[in-house]
Image (cartoon, helix red, strand yellow):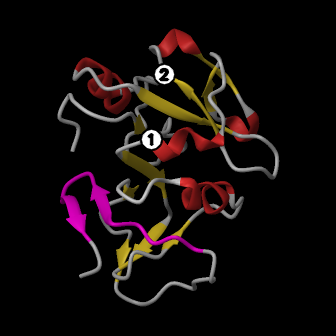
Amino acid sequence: MLDGTGDPVCLFVAVRGEPGATPDGALPVLDAARALGRRVLLPVTVGGAPLDWAAYEGPGSLGPGPHGLLEPTGPRLGPSAVADAGLIVVPALAVDHRGVRLGRGGGHYDRTLPLAGAATRLVALVGDDELVEGPLPAEPHDVAVHAVWRPRAGVTPLPL
């Protein structure tokens, strides 16, 4: 998934028991992507607008943001930065087999994902038991993810 070449990857800083969060605050996925030579972009929350993006340059490039999240403190690239990404990994509480993602309710990714390029792969990072059988509620504006990434099971392409 992160092969060291190509377009930037859009990731996020995992918190509050999300997959990828560590008790000591380490950022293994972000640091691994950078070690592979990838340009890592992280979201910056901007009220009710689509997410803004800025480069992750290591743990020292992060500061506190809204909702208890860590965000990059460097120059903002604008919401359209996702159009150049080869991969966008999004947080989710659950994903169904159609690729419908249940988020935390802020709508930040719902406003952002339509700006992604046609070739951009959308992957939801979820817990091992958060790929669900039953259909999740979907709205016309929802953008389905192409795969889920689970800690033990790895990446599962969707729809199944």
Please state the horizontal and vertical placement of residue 49, each as a whole percent of the image.
Answer: 77, 50
Regarding mark 1 in the picture, which secondary structure is present there?
Answer: helix
| 102 versus 116 height, above or below | below
Whichever of callouts 2 and 1 sits on the residue coming sooner in the sequence is 2
Name the residue type under label 1.
Asp
Q: Nearer the viewer, residue 144 or 70?
A: 144
Between disc 2 and disc 1, the foreground one is: 1
Q: Which mark is residue 56?
A: 2
Quadrant where the C terminus sits is bottom left
| 71 versus 10 height, above or below | above
Q: Residue furthest bottom?
A: 134
Regarding mark 2 in the picture, which secondary structure is present there?
Answer: loop
Quadrant where the N terminus sits is top left
Please state the horizontal and vertical placement of residue 47, each as a whole percent of the image.
Answer: 82, 45
Q: Is residue 151 magenta?
A: yes
Residue at (26, 20) in percent of width and height: 37
Residue at (63, 61) in percent of width and height: 104
Residue at (42, 72) in percent of width and height: 95
- Region of the chain picked out in magenta, as a range: 142-157
Left or right of 73 on screen, residue 27: left
Residue at (60, 43) in percent of width and height: 80
- The total of numbered circles placed on residues is 2
Q: Nearer the viewer, residue 64 or 142?
A: 142
Left or right of 113 on screen, residue 158: left
Instruction: Look at mark 1 in the image and give the residue it sits on.
Output: 84
Q: Is residue 36 magenta?
A: no
Name the residue type under label 2.
Tyr
Quadrant of the image occupied by residue 77: top right
Please state the horizontal and vertical placement of residue 32, each as a whole percent of the image.
Answer: 27, 25
Quadrant of the image occupied by residue 134: bottom left
Do the residues bearing badges 2 and 1 touch, measured as CB atoms within 8 Å?
no
